[in-house]
Image (cartoon, helix red, strand yellow):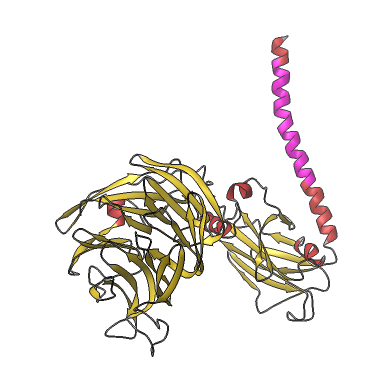
C-alpha cells in the first residue's frame, strides 16, 4: 500500500510541472494571438534589437532611426512634426554588461533588489515590463528594462503631455528581440563573490610601504564609482554616497555599520573638524553641517568645502569656480576671495590653475591639485601646488614630461606626511610620494600593492598616527558589482 502511494506521488510530481509548463505555453500563445489581432491595423518599424507596432497618427524620425547589431534607436511622435507633437517617445536598446545597466538603475535611484524582485512600478510593453526610473529630469519620464537572455538594456523616454492616453497604447506595441548570442548574466550583487585583495609590501625610495586590508562588515557591492567620500574621526568612519551618509565603527579587524542617514538630495564632498561637525557639500549648491546623526548647520557657502581641523576656517572650491576662503564665526560661515581667481578667464586669472581637482588643508599647508597650462604647449597638465596658510607657494609637485615617474592624471586625495607629501591619482591608478622639497620619491601601482586590476582610488585621509586610509572601488571578477574596500598604509 505504501509503495503504491509512493509511486502515485512520484507520478503526480512528474505530471504537475509538465502540466504547468503546458498551461504557461498555452497562455503565452493565446496572448500572442490576441496581440497580433490588436496590431493588425498598425504600422511596423524595426530598429535592430526591437520592433514597434505603432497606431495610426504616429510618425517616426527616419533620420534618427538606428538599427545595428546590438543597438537600436527610434523616436516617435504623435503630430505632423516633432515640434508640433503633444508626445514624443524615444526607445533605445544597447547590448552592454549587466554592471553598466545596474549603474544606471543606481543613478536613477531605482532600488536594485526591488528591481530584481519585479517590485518597481512601471509600464508594460509588448513582451516586457519596464521599471519607472524618474520623472524629474527635463519633464521626461524614463523607463528601464534589461533582457538578460541577450544582454541588451532598453530605455524608454516619454516627454511632452505625459498624461496622454496615447502613450500606453504606443508602448504596448514595443516588442524587444529575443534573437542574438545567448548572454551569461552576472549574479546580483548580493549573490556575487566579493573581491579578495592580495596585499604585497612595496618599496618607494628607501621606504617599505605596508598595506593592511580593513574589510566592511559583510559584502560591500556598489554600482557607483568615482562618487565615494569618507572621513575618519574618533573611532568612526563616515561614508558619503549620493544622499546616504553611513556611519561605521572603525576597528582594525573591520568596519561595523552603525546607522545610515538619508539626506534630502545628493552630495559629493565630505570634510570634518575636531568638533565632530561633518561638512557635506553638493558642489554648486549650499553646504550643510551634520553632527550626531542630524543636520546641525545650514550655510550659504557654495562649492566643495575642505575645513581646517579647528573648524575656524576652510577653503571652498568647485571645478573652475573661484575658490574662496571660508570663515566660521559662531556657526555662521562667510566666504571671501582667496589667492586663486579667474580660473575660467585667461585675461583675469590670478594663479596658475584653470580647473581644480581637489583641495586639502593639512597640518601646515594648503594643497591644491588641478589643471594648469603646460609650459611648452597650449595643453593642460595636472599639478599639485603646496601653499602656506598665508597663500605663499611653497613647492610644486608633478612631472613635466609624460616619461616622468610623477606625471599626474586626476588627483583624488592628498596629504602631508612626516617626510613630505603623498597623493592618490585616480587616472593613473597610482600612489605618489614626494620629499619636502618636491623631489619625487616614487610611486606605487595599486595593482601591485593591493592585488587589484583596474581600481578607482576614491578618497584618502591621513590619520593622527601618521598612517593613511584609502578608499578604493574594484569591479568583481564575476561582474556582479564593484567592491568597496578600505586599506591602511604605513611605513613612509
Q: Is residue 337 above or below residue 107?
A: below
* Residue nearest the viewer, comparing 271 with 268: 271
- Decide if residue 201 is on the left or right side of residue 217: left
Indicate whether residue 11 is drawn in magenta: yes
Q: Is residue 253 above or below residue 472?
A: above
Residue reaching furthest top? 1
Foreground residue, 98 or 215? 215
Asked if the stretch drawn in magenta spans residue 376, the answer is: no
User: Which residue corresponds to the image point at 45% horizontal and 67% vertical from the top-left?
Assistant: 333
Vertical side of 255 occupied by 320: above or below: below
For residue 38, side relative to residue 144 (left or right):
right
Q: Is residue 240 above or below residue 313?
A: above
Q: Position of residue 269 (x, y in %)?
A: 44, 62
Quadrant location of the C terminus? bottom left
Residue 137 shows in this picture: yes
Write the residue at 73% across / 29% down. 15
Residue depicted at 77% across the width and 47% down the height: 28
Quadrant where the N terminus is found in the figure: top right
Image quadrant where residue 82 sits:
bottom right
Left or right of 75, for residue 379: left
The quadrant in which residue 454 appears is bottom left
Magenta region's main secondary structure?
helix
Which corner quadrant of the image does residue 57 belong to? Answer: bottom right
Furthest-front residue in this view: 330
Image x and y of residue 219, in percent: 46, 43
Q: Residue extending furthest bottom?
A: 347
Q: Which residues are magenta?
A: 6-27
Q: Position of residue 423 (x, y in %)?
A: 29, 63
> Is residue 457 in view?
no
363, 111: nearer the viewer: 363
Amino acid at each position: 500500500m505504501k509503495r503504491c502511494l509512493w509511486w502515485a506521488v512520484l507520478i503526480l510530481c512528474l505530471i504537475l510541472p509538465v502540466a504547468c509548463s503546458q498551461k504557461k505555453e498555452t497562455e503565452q500563445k493565446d496572448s500572442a494571438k490576441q496581440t497580433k489581432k490588436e496590431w493588425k491595423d498598425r504600422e511596423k518599424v524595426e530598429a535592430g534589437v526591437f520592433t514597434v507596432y505603432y497606431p495610426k497618427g504616429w510618425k517616426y524620425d527616419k533620420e534618427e532611426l538606428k538599427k545595428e547589431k546590438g543597438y537600436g534607436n527610434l523616436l516617435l511622435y504623435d503630430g505632423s512634426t516633432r515640434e508640433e507633437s503633444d508626445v514624443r517617445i524615444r526607445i533605445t536598446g544597447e547590448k552592454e554588461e549587466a554592471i553598466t545597466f545596474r549603474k544606471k538603475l543606481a543613478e536613477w535611484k531605482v532600488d536594485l533588489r526591488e528591481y530584481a524582485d519585479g517590485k518597481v512600478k512601471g509600464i508594460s510593453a509588448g513582451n516586457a515590463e519596464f521599471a519607472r526610473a524618474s520623472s524629474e529630469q527635463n519633464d521626461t519620464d524614463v523607463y528601464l528594462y534589461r533582457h538578460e537572455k541577450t544582454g541588451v538594456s532598453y530605455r524608454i523616454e516619454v516627454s511632452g503631455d505625459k498624461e496622454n492616453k496615447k502613450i500606453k497604447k504606443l508602448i504596448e506595441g514595443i516588442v524587444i528581440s529575443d534573437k542574438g548570442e545567448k548572454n551569461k548574466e552576472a549574479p546580483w550583487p548580493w549573490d556575487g563573490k566579493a573581491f579578495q585583495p592580495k596585499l604585497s609590501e612595496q618599496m618607494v625610495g628607501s621606504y617599505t610601504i605596508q598595506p593592511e586590508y580593513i574589510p566592511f562588515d559583510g559584502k560591500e557591492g556598489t554600482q557607483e564609482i568615482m562618487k565615494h567620500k569618507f572621513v575618519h574621526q574618533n573611532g568612526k568612519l563616515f561614508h558619503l554616497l549620493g544622499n546616504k551618509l553611513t556611519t561605521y565603527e572603525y576597528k582594525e579587524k573591520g568596519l561595523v555599520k552603525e546607522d545610515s542617514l538619508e539626506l534630502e538630495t545628493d552630495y559629493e564632498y565630505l570634510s570634518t573638524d575636531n568638533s565632530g561637525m561633518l561638512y557635506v557639500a553638493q558642489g554648486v549648491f549650499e553646504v550643510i553641517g551634520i553632527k550626531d546623526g542630524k543636520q546641525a548647520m545650514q550655510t550659504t557657502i557654495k562649492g566643495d568645502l575642505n575645513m581646517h581641523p579647528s573648524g575656524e576656517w576652510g577653503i571652498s572650491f568647485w571645478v573652475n569656480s573661484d575658490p574662496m576662503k571660508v570663515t566660521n564665526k559662531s556657526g555662521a560661515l562667510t566666504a571671501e576671495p582667496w589667492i586663486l581667481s579667474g580660473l575660467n578667464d585667461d585675461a583675469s586669472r590670478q594663479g596658475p590653475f584653470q580647473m581644480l581637482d581637489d583641495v586639502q588643508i593639512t597640518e601646515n599647508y594648503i594643497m591644491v591639485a588641478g589643471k594648469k597650462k603646460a609650459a611648452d604647449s597650449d595643453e593642460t597638465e595636472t599639478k599639485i601646488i603646496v601653499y602656506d596658510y598665508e597663500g605663499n607657494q611653497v613647492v610644486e609637485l608633478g612631472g613635466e614630461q609624460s616619461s616622468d615617474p610623477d606625471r599626474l592624471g586626476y588627483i583624488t586625495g592628498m596629504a602631508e606626511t612626516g617626510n613630505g607629501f603623498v597623493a592618490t591619482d585616480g587616472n593613473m591608478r597610482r600612489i605618489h610620494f614626494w620629499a619636502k622639497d618636491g623631489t619625487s620619491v616614487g610611486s606605487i601601482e595599486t595593482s601591485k600593492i593591493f592585488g587589484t586590476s583596474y581600481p578607482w582610488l576614491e578618497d584618502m585621509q591621513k590619520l593622527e598616527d601618521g598612517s593613511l586610509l584609502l578608499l578604493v572601488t574594484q569591479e568583481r571578477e564575476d561582474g556582479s558589482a564593484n567592491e568597496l574596500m578600505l586599506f591602511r598604509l604605513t611605513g613612509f
